[in-house]
Image (tube, helix red, strand yellow):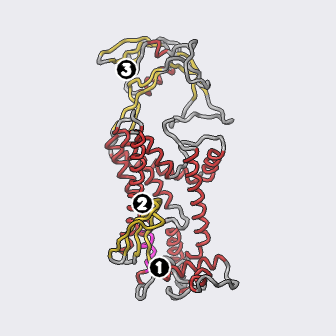
């Protein structure tokens, strides 16, 4: 029962943290919009039915039922067509049906693209009251629109930097120490599918020498050991050679004799991943082996480590987005077939909540480590929100920024060559693409949620 409550607590922490991150993201849009004089009619966290709202001044602040996003409503998001009055009526079929009670079945001459664009312009024009034209979003200079749209993602970046600072400088990062964390009982070939020792298995050199978990390596053959990597290098190069090892156990130094066994081990890269040859086969190398593993310890990092850590996280998210189609295919194959989920692949908010619940419910993890894991999870979520919202596709923030930049480029060239000002970019023409993006994002979300339910990623299996 206690583990169930802790699981629920972990999920609740992530839900609240995500809601706060979304709320602050929208504040990143709200504050500059109000500073630049744009009328903001709504500030909402979540989607769907409104659970609570309160009007303050001209803005309604509220919380909706589904905490999977948020938005602010600014008047005049789209410019009128061809310089027409922003408050003029549209000829789109959607508005005509609304105006005539939904009974108009006359054939339409407009294309679907034109109709969607006209409806978007009309919906935008309807938000502008009498005498409010100067407060419309599209009326702002390009740089102010870019600041407003980048305010949200950069708020998530700021949150991520703060959380990574707390994580790295306050808790520290797990690093290998010179203390033995595990000792293998026997020698198991690297390519073997068996992970347990049978009665005829050969004892691992470390266990045979009497090394125990908790021993700290002091020296090997008289060389003081200052890092686990140093001891690994000596052992790998000393197959079949007896080594004089001094360990510290219970405060006293203990001399032992250790003879590494020549075995085949996988070659790994700097990230611990198995290296493959040109044919895609794992690369093997004969090295000395004793069967001991390092214990990890949290080491607090300097402030200079924060931004590189954020940068690495951003790089990982960018790489995932660039490979998203293949990643989603892999998720689908795992969800609807016998394949396994990639623990480093994309997950939904359901999967994130499940991971948080697992972290909170495992009683073998110290509370401090649980807190650090939660902070790291929220920091990574904010990095994902930052990067994803910069994708230059509407309705994402990056799409609005791209539209504003294109407008700025057009106007700059017109001014340079003394041509007529081309006016605002008609981003309403992109509504069909916007709907396509929304449908794709919705389908992606449903796939990931389904996969996280039927075949979830577990970090502790």
User: CA–CA distance between discs 2 and 1?
Assistant: 23 Å
Instruction: Specify the segment rendered in magenta.
Output: 136-147
Residue 151 seen in render: no
Say which quarter of the image contains residue 201.
top right
Residue 282 seen in render: yes
Q: Is residue 96 above or below residue 345?
A: below
- How far across and how far down the image is residue 391, in percent? 53, 61
Magenta-drawn stretch contains 113? no
- How far across and how far down the image is residue 73, in percent? 44, 73
User: Which residue is identified by label 3?
Assistant: 215
User: Which residue is identified by label 1?
Assistant: 76
Q: Which part of the image, by quadrant, shows the N terminus? A: top left
Circle 3/circle 1 CB separation < 8 Å: no
User: Which residue is identified by label 2?
Assistant: 22
Q: Which mark is residue 276?
A: none
Q: Secondary structure at mark 2?
A: helix
- Closer-to-camera residue (182/457): 457
Q: Residue at x 52, y 75 (%)?
A: 407
Q: Secondary structure at mark 3?
A: loop
How packed mark 2 is, by other alpha carbons closer than 10 Å (few <14, some 14-19, many 20 or more), is many
User: CA–CA distance between discs 3 and 2?
Assistant: 47 Å
User: CA–CA distance between discs 3 and 1?
Assistant: 69 Å
Q: Residue at x 57, y 85 (%)?
A: 99
- How far across and how far down the image is residue 146, in percent? 45, 69
How packed mark 3 is, by other alpha carbons closer than 10 Å (few <14, some 14-19, many 20 or more), is many
Q: Is residue 296 above or below residue 352?
A: above
- How far across and how far down the image is residue 147, in percent? 42, 69
């Amino acid at each position: 029962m206690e583990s169930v409550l802790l699981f629920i607590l972990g999920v609740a922490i992530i839900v609240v943290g995500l809601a706060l991150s979304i709320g602050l993201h929208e504040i990143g849009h709200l504050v500059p919009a109000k500073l630049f004089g744009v009328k903001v009619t709504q500030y909402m966290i979540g989607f769907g039915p409104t659970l609570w709202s309160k009007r303050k001044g001209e803005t309604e602040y509220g919380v909706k039922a589904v905490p999977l996003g948020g938005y602010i409503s600014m008047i005049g998001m789209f410019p009128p067509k061809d310089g027409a009055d922003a408050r003029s009526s549209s000829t789109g079929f959607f508005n005509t049906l609304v105006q005539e009670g939904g009974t108009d079945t006359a054939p339409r001459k407009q294309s679907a693209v034109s109709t969607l664009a006209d409806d978007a312009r009309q919906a935008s024009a309807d938000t502008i009251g009498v005498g409010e034209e100067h407060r419309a979003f599209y009326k702002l200079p390009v740089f102010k629109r870019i600041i407003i749209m980048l305010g949200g993602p950069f708020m998530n970046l700021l949150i991520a930097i703060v959380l990574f600072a707390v994580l790295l400088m306050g808790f520290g990062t797990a690093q290998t120490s010179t203390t033995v964390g595990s000792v293998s009982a026997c020698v198991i070939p690297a390519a073997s599918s068996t992970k347990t020792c049978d009665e005829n298995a050969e004892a691992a050199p470390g266990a045979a020498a009497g090394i125990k978990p908790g021993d700290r390596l002091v020296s090997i053959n008289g060389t003081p050991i200052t890092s686990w990597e140093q001891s690994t290098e000596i052992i790998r190069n000393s197959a079949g050679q007896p080594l004089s090892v001094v360990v510290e156990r219970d405060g006293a130094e203990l001399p032992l004799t250790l003879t590494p066994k020549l075995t085949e081990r996988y070659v790994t890269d700097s990230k611990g991943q198995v290296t493959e040859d040109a044919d895609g086969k794992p690369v093997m190398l004969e090295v000395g082996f004793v069967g001991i593993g390092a214990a990890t310890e949290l080491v607090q990092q300097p402030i200079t480590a924060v931004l590189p850590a954020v940068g690495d996280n951003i790089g990982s998210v960018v790489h995932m987005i660039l490979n998203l189609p293949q990643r989603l295919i892999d998720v689908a194959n795992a969800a609807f077939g016998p394949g396994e989920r990639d623990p480093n692949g994309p997950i939904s908010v359901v999967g994130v909540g499940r991971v948080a619940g697992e972290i909170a419910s495992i009683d073998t993890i110290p509370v401090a480590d649980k807190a650090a894991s939660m902070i790291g999870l929220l920091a990574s979520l904010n990095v994902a929100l930052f990067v994803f919202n910069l994708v230059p596709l509407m309705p994402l923030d990056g799409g609005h920024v791209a539209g504003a930049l294109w407008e700025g480029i057009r106007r700059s060239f017109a001014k340079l060559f003394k041509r007529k000002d081309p006016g605002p970019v008609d981003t309403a023409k992109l509504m069909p693409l916007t709907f396509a993006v929304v449908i794709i994002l919705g389908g992606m979300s449903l796939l990931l949620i389904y996969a996280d339910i039927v075949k979830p990623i577990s970090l502790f299996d």
